[in-house]
Image: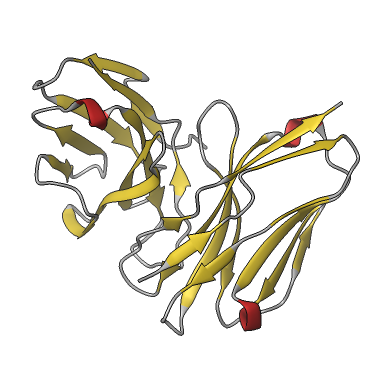
């Protein structure tokens, strides 16, 4: 069974540009989560989507947004990129939308903002 | 607010030594879930275990064991007879009953030398 997949693996942008990151969940999973792992800040929760709806959001500015498609894949968009947005962005999926449902992670997208 | 503390930033051991990774958590919720994840150099977070707040049974899986103690708010992870392949960053995480937001500790870097 395929795991969570993310694309691209690496992304290089300049300050002020927009970045789009993509995630495909494990087959049968309906929930998708996004986390940011920045140097010195650790792993921080960004967003949770379930059945196409945003269910929870972390302490990030509105320029971090996303969506979930009918096939449960997801996009994370980061507008007006800042240098401090450079990080590993990890996507996870779970079978359902309960906290008891384990989140399984993908390999991440390394975003570098120059 | 929820908080997870992994006081050990980095641990180095020689192969075949036993090693314990500490995790202390804070939460006001009576129902919560604790997790351990492993992050090898490839970057992907690998799920190791989930424990519910109402289940204090310790668990053993091969060389891995977990000691959950509500009285001290700790969820420690022990690797018996460590191997070089165990070298990774290990994260302890906590989520409450609703919201599905994983709160991670800062991680412990484990280096196992041959």
In the rendered image, residue B28, in percent from the top left (x then y), is placed at 41, 81
- In the image, is A110 to the left or to the right of B113? left
In the rendered image, residue B16, in percent from the top left (x then y), is placed at 91, 39
Total tally of numbered discs in the picture: 0
* Image quarter of residue B9: top right
The answer to whether B109 is drawn above or below residue B36 in the figure is: above
Task: Give the residue displayed 73% in from the left and 37% down from the top.
Answer: B86
The answer to whether B66 is drawn above or below residue B42 in the figure is: below
User: Where does the C terminus of chain A fall, quadrant-wise?
Assistant: top left
**Residue B36 seen from this side:** yes
- In the image, is B19 to the left or to the right of B2? right
- Camera-nearest residue between A113 and B86: A113
- Camera-nearest residue between A85 and B51: A85
**Residue A28 seen from this side:** no
Q: How is the image coloured?
A: secondary structure
- Camera-nearest residue between B95 and A96: B95
* Image quarter of residue A42: top left
In the rendered image, residue A72, in percent from the top left (x then y), is placed at 26, 45
In the rendered image, residue B40, in percent from the top left (x then y), is placed at 60, 32
- Camera-nearest residue between B94 and B47: B94
Task: Give the residue displayed 48% in from the left and 37% down from the top.
Answer: A3
Task: Give the residue displayed 33% in from the left and 72% down from the top.
Answer: B98
Task: Give the residue displayed 22% in from the left and 54% down from the top.
Answer: A59
The answer to whether A86 is drawn above or below residue B26 in the figure is: above
């Amino acid at each position: 069974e395929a795991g969570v997949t993310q694309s691209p693996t690496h992304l290089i942008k300049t300050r002020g540009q927009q970045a789009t990151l993509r995630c495909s969940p494990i087959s049968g999973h309906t929930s998708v989560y996004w986390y940011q792992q920045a140097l010195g800040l650790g792993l921080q929760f960004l967003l949770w989507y379930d059945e196409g709806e945003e269910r929870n959001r972390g302490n990030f500015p509105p320029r971090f947004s996303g969506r979930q498609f009918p096939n449960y894949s997801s996009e994370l968009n980061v507008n007006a990129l800042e240098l401090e947005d450079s990080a590993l962005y990890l996507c996870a999926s779970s079978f359902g939308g309960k906290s008891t449902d384990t989140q399984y992670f993908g390999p991440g997208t390394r975003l570098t903002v120059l | 607010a929820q908080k997870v503390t992994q006081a050990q930033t980095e641990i180095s051991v020689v192969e075949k030594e036993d090693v314990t990774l500490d995790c202390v958590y804070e939460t006001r919720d009576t129902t919560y879930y604790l997790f351990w994840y492993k992050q090898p150099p490839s970057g992907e977070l690998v799920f190791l275990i989930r424990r519910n707040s109402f289940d204090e049974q310790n668990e053993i899986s091969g060389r891995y064991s977990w000691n959950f103690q509500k009285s001290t708010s700790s969820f420690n992870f022990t690797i018996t007879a460590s191997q070089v392949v165990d070298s990774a960053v290990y994260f302890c995480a906590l989520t409450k009953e609703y919201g599905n937001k994983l709160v991670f500790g800062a991680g412990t870097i484990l280096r196992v030398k041959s």
